Structure formats: structure tokens, C-alpha cells
Image (spheres, rainbow, N blue to C red):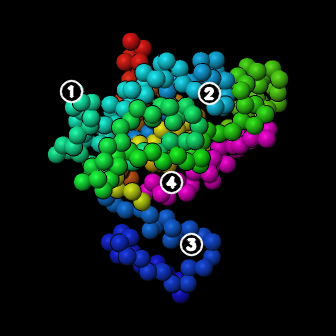
Amino acid sequence: LSYIKLYNYGERVMTNRMRAYLPQRIVQFLTATHPTAHKIYLCRHGESEYNTTGRLGGNSPITAKGVVFSEILARFAGEKICGMRRDESTGEWCETSSTKRARLWTSSLIRTIQTAAHIPHPKISNGDWEQMSPRVYRNIDEIFAGDCEGMTPEDIVLNNPQAAHLRSMDKIGYRYPRGESYFDLISRIEPCIQEMESYTEPVLIVSHQAILRLIFAYLTGVDREKAPGMNTFAQNVIYEITLDASCEDLITNDVDAVPSFVVAHDFNADVAR
């Protein structure tokens, strides 16, 4: 007999004869999930040099506007996510009664690392925890456009019209020549999703549009086939997702609607000043 017994949502797990691939994956998933209320913050990198020209992929640095957003993100992370206070006289971040442990993930590409560069990393709890200790994951790098890297959509239509047509017909399944598809991304980010699900601390993920669409779709119950067409994740917006046992009842599966457990913090006006 094959079975899984969970005690207190994963505090203790007992399995028996879980030998096939799918049962083992089910065990992995169930041991990572928990009903404890927690927050996930999703944020696209600040404006990059490639963004200004509409080019795909690459590893370009952020622009002056991207730097402005990185400073806004640092304040948001310190005050809103970590619950800390900045001492204006010394510039140091101090613990308060609202301080909580928090985590930070970025991709390995320079534009996300630069966007998160100003986020403070003070030690709290008598030095036992480093706030927002940066973790770099290649799994959440942007979709690789292969032969189309560095090209604009207009360049692709001009130089490879067949590729442009095929992608418009099947955006989730289309794989760029020598590149990746959204299905490839789903496989790539799965280990990160499981790790993210296991945390009770708030997590800030600074990544890229395609990756964030898939994570957002997963967390908000949107079908994966609809994820590539989502209009979310403009730059300079931070999405705060509060997850608890009641979220499932609030899922609408509407790709154009933001669920009530998601708050979008829009800083475009601040960046444009």
C-alpha cells in the first residue's frame, strides 16, 4: 500500500512505498506547502539599456531611471517588507517592534542584481539573521531568446517572419531558435517554486517579465496557457501577494483581474520625477 501521512501540515511526514516518479513529486510538493500566512513580493528589474530600445534578452545594465527605482525598492524593502527604521543621522537600519525576517532572490543577470543593490542587509536577532541576504538563482533568469537575443520584435518580423508567426500562434509552446519556450521556463523554475512554498518569511523576488508572469499565475490560480498574455509586470511596480488558507476561495482565473489578496505598489510617478 502506498500512502502519505502529514502531521500538522508537514511538521512530520510519513510515507510508504512512494517509489514512482509522480508519487515522489507529490511528496515533495506536500512537504513544502503550509497554511501559515506569508507574503511574496514580485518585482521586475528597473529599466535597462535594452529596454530603452525594445531589444530582447541580453545582459545590459540598468539606466538612470533604473537606479532611481533601485533606491525606491531599497526603502520599500527596509520599511515595508522588513519592518525596520532608518536612522537618518547614521544611515543605519534599526530593528523595531514590527521587524520581521525577510529573504531576497535575484536572477544572475546584471539588471536584477543592480536593481537590488541598494537593499540593506543588517543583522538582526542578535546577529542570528542577515536581512535580505541576497540569493542569486539562474533558474529565474529571463527566457533565453536564442538566435533572437538582442533583436527587437520588428527585427524578428523582418529577419525571421516564420518565427514571429509561430510565436504569435502559440506563445507558451513556441521555442526561440536555439532558445527557450515558456514550457522550458516552467521546468526551470519548478525547484524555486517548491523552495518558495516552504518559507514562512516574506520573500522579495527581483526577476524578469516572463518568469514573474509564471510565478504570478501559479500563485493566483491563472491557467499556465494564459500566463504569457498577462499584462502585469510593468517596470517600477511591486506586487505584494498575501498567501494564507483563504486564498483559494478568492481565485478568479481572470487573467486581466488582480485578486483581492494582491496589492500593486506603483512607483512609476516617483521614478518619472
Q: Amino acid at mark 2?
A: Ser
Examine the residues drawn in magenta and state their main secondary structure.
helix
Label 1's element?
A: loop
Residue range (magenta): 172-197
- Residue 246 seen in this snapshot: no
Name the disc covering residue 89, or none. 1
Are circles 4 and 1 on residues that touch, CB within 8 Å?
A: no
In contact (CB < 8 Å): disc 2 and disc 4: no
Distance between mark 1 and mark 3 Cα atoms? 54 Å
Q: Could you give the CA–CA distance between mark 1 and mark 2, rounded to whole angstroms?
A: 35 Å
Q: Estimate the x, y position of residue 227 in percent, counting from the top left.
A: 56, 40
Q: Which residue is mark 2?
A: 60
Callout 1 environment at 10 Å: few (<14), some (14 to 19), or many (20+)?
Answer: few
Vertical position of residue 159 compared to residue 3: above or below: above
Mark before the other along the chain sequence, 3 or 2: 3
Instruction: Measure the C-alpha gap from mark 2 to mark 4.
Output: 26 Å
Task: Please state which amino acid type lies under the numbered disc 3.
Answer: Gln
Q: Secondary structure at mark 2?
A: loop
**With 38 as the anchor, is 224 left or right in this view?**
right
Give me the disc on residue 24. 3
Dividing the picture into quadrants, the one containing residue 36 is bottom left
Q: Amino acid at mark 1?
A: Ser
The residue sitting at 59% across, 18% down in the picture is 52
Q: Nearer the viewer's eye, disc 1 or disc 3?
A: 1
Report, in whole angstroms, how far the alpha carbon at label 3 lies from the one at label 2: 40 Å
Upstream in sequence: badge 1 or badge 2: 2
Mark 1 vs 3, N-terminal side:
3
Give the number of the disc on residue 193: 4
Q: Residues within 10 Å of mark 3 (few under 14, many from 20)?
A: few
Query: Distance between the Cα atoms at labels 4 and 1?
Result: 40 Å
Q: Nearer the viewer, mark 3 or mark 2?
A: 2
